Image: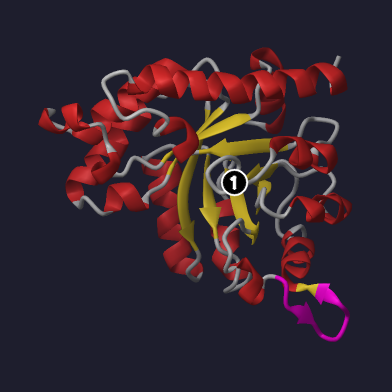
Amino acid sequence: MTREQLYREILAKQSFLCIGLDSELAKLPPHLLDCEDPVFEFNRQIIEATHDLCVAYKPNLAFYESQGWRGWQTLEKTMSLIPDNIFTIADAKRGDIGNTSTQYAKAFFGEMDFDSVTVAPYMGEDSVKPFLDFEGKWVILLALTSNKGSHDFQFAEQDGSGEPLYEKVMRRAQTWGSAENLMFVTGATHPEKFQDIRRIAPDNFLLVPGIGAQGGELEKVCEYGLNDQVGLLVNSSRGIIFAGSGEDFAEKARAAALEIQGQMAQVLAQRFR
């Protein structure tokens, strides 16, 4: 999916919502556990209930890999359900060197046909470039994450310049890719940093985790995070998919997604008339 296609989908749906499919077996509604593939059935109902409200789905691979080969089958089946006009993100957080990264890229882009994959940049350019060599695919680079531990390294100043590490990562990465194939993960729990982030990367899309369960606020993210093509994919995972735990879980998920989408529609109406 191209940048322009993603922008058109955002305007058509009045939404820049990404739904994280962090489908942890232990948290599924109990009545699904009798199904042949409980996680797949859960994902199926979530996708059917929310596909018109979001522009992206982001399976967190840990919850599939933890199930061994059955989990990979579940992921493959889940991917087959997602409509072609919805952007897909392999939340894999890969970050190994050249040849290994090439094989990861072949897996996610060649075999599984994801639109994008999350990548850790801390082994440098040769760990990222193999993913950028796939035409029409995206790297979503970890820059400023939403977890508490982000303060351990990402805010460390570099070379006495006063520039935190995450800013240096973002500046350097833009010499590897462009706004047409490179996004950055920037956590909603750091809304005060979005003005600086947009100064460094004015045109790139930002994948923004941390809305809802992790405490991020959509209004604050939008204030400084929006650009002239929206430029945001705001993710909610647990707050949507686990909004309910009974047989009506899909209805509860839709209601939670609809609430966020409604807020996004108001933002878009004000900024993109």
Q: Choose top left, top right, bottom left or bottom right for residue 9.
A: top right
Please report the residue visible at 38 percent of the width from the left and 39 percent of the height from the top: 112
Mark 1 belongs to which amino acid? Pro
Q: Is 143 drawn above or below residue 168 in the view shown?
A: above
Residue closer to the observer: 78 or 50: 50
**Magenta residues, start to end:** 155-163
- Asked if residue 16 lies left or right of residue 97, the reply is right
Q: Percent x, y for residue 77?
A: 28, 31
In the picture of the structure, the residue carrying the numbered disc 1 is 209
Say which residue appears at 67% left-offset and 13% top-offset.
Answer: 12
Q: Is residue 7 left or right of residue 27?
A: right
Q: Is residue 38 visible?
A: yes
Q: Is residue 209 left or right of residue 20?
A: right
**Residue drawn at 76 percent across, 35 percent down:** 219
Which of these two is toward me, 12 or 95?
12
Q: How many marks?
A: 1
Magenta stretch mostly in which secondary structure? loop
Residue 149, horizontal then vertical, whole percent: 57, 69
Does residue 99 belong to the magenta stretch? no
Q: How is colour applied across the structure in the image? A: secondary structure
In the picture, the quarter occupied by the C terminus is top right
Q: Residue at x 42, y 50 (%)?
A: 106
Q: Nearer the viewer, residue 215 or 11?
A: 215
Label 1 neighbour load within 10 Å: few <14, some 14-19, many 20+: many
Q: Quadrant of the N terminus?
A: top right
Image position, residue 57 (x, y; %): 49, 33
Q: Height in image: 98 above or below 20?
A: below
Say above or below: 60 vs 41: below
Residue 160 at x, y percent in the picture? 86, 86
Camera-side residue: 250 or 115?
A: 250
At mark 1, the secondary structure is loop
For residue 114, say whether it is visible: no
